[in-house]
Image (cartoon, rainbow, N blue to C red):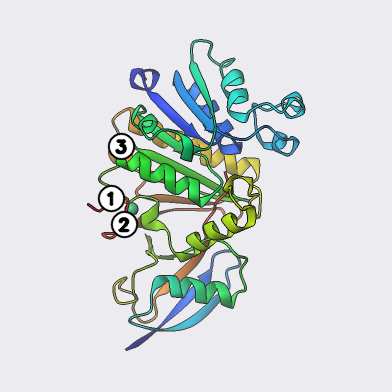
Amino acid sequence: MEAVIGSRCLVIGAGALGNEVVKNLVLSGAKSITIVDMDEVAISNLNRCIFFRTEDAQAGRSKAEVIAHRAKELNEVAKLEATIGRIQDLPSKRFRENDVVFGCLDNVAARLHSNSHSYYHRVPYIDGATMGTSGKVQVVIPPSTPCLQCAMNRTHYKLMEKRFSCTGADVTFFEPKMAAEITTTSVIAAVQVREGLKVLSGKSDECIRNIWYYNGLANRSDVLEVDLDPECAVHTK
Amino acid sequence: MSVRVRVRNAETGSTVDMELEEENTVQEIIEGAAGYWEKDAGAYVIRKGKKLLRGQQTVLGASITHSDDLELIPDPEGG
Ligand SMILES: [Zn+2]
């Protein structure tokens, strides 16, 4: 518990997963959390984000700032810092300052960026992703485990190119083809934070190896192994 | 030498048999199966048992053999 209280966590993305992950972290005792997101709260976010209110959308408040402000109500002594901007614009050294990084993103490009910078600075990266009633959590513990890029294939890169060509310059305006049900988001965020707590309490050996897939409709969940890609640019010398 | 495998669609449970050559890659299997089922544009992965296969691996390299059961899984992207 002391390791959790003294830890520093970076949460990238302040959407549905970011809301749940921060809530779980604060309630688990984490006291130093940085939240990064460039977007403002929209009315369409309200049905799946515990910290957002109608007034936030009406006032055009920053998602990261709203989460930092409201999560503090759960623990007054917690230090929550909001950084408004794209993760790609955050100085790389900011990754190094943390004990664990949580990916709560909605696009491949930002995930690859967060994955590679966490890996470079040897900071464990726990990525969550959702779609409808399905989701997954991947745990990356550098330098021993495969990274996100090791598990990606051409369909991921095609999707990334499509997002880029759709939006011109910025990938963050993309709406996923199927928004996640809040139950999916809750399950995935809970597992992300559970894995993070293992990392912080020195139990990385007990973490998911390597990806946990969840299908809430078919009552299935599976842990799948991924081989480390010897040619992956993230960790080849 | 070619091998015949069965690919299961994780979303519907339906299956398709595919004839593969040793040099075919996992991403060719993914694109072939996704095309067969006319899947939406999106990211997909293939699993064999408890292993998620890497896209660049060949049938030979991924130790895919005759009568193997594979599964095509949509890879979530949202947050
Ligand atoms: Zn890698």
Q: Which quadrant of the figure contains the C terminus of chain B?
A: top right
Residue type at the position of mark 3: His
The mark found on residue A232 in the picture is 2
> Could you say where residue A125 lies in the image, as x and y percent from the top left?
39, 40
Name the chain under label 1.
Answer: A
The mark found on residue A121 in the picture is 3
- The answer to which quarter of the image holds residue A193 is top left
For this view, does B61 lie left or right of residue A138?
A: left
Q: Which quadrant of the figure contains the N terminus of chain B?
A: bottom left
Regarding mark 2 in the picture, which secondary structure is present there?
loop
Is residue B12 placed above or below A13 in the rendered structure?
A: below
Mark 1 and mark 3 lie on one chain; the one further toward the N terminus is 3
> Looking at this view, is A233 or A223 the one in front?
A233
Q: Is residue A177 visible?
A: yes
> Could you say where residue A225 lies in the image, as x and y percent from the top left?
35, 56
Q: Dot 1 corresponds to which residue? A: A235
Q: Circles 1 and 3: CB distance less than 8 Å?
A: no
Regarding mark 3 in the picture, which secondary structure is present there?
loop
Q: Circles 2 and 1: CB distance less than 8 Å?
A: yes
Is residue A154 placed above or below A110 in the rendered structure?
A: below
> Could you say where residue A4 lies in the image, as x and y percent from the top left?
38, 22
- The answer to which quarter of the image holds residue A84 is top right
Q: Is mark 1 within 8 Å of ligand 1?
A: yes
Q: Circles 3 and 2: CB distance less than 8 Å?
A: no
Q: Residue at x 53, y 42 (%)?
A: A105
Q: Residue at x 51, y 77 (%)?
A: B32
Gap between marks 2 and 1 measured at Cα: 6 Å
Residue extending furthest top? A77
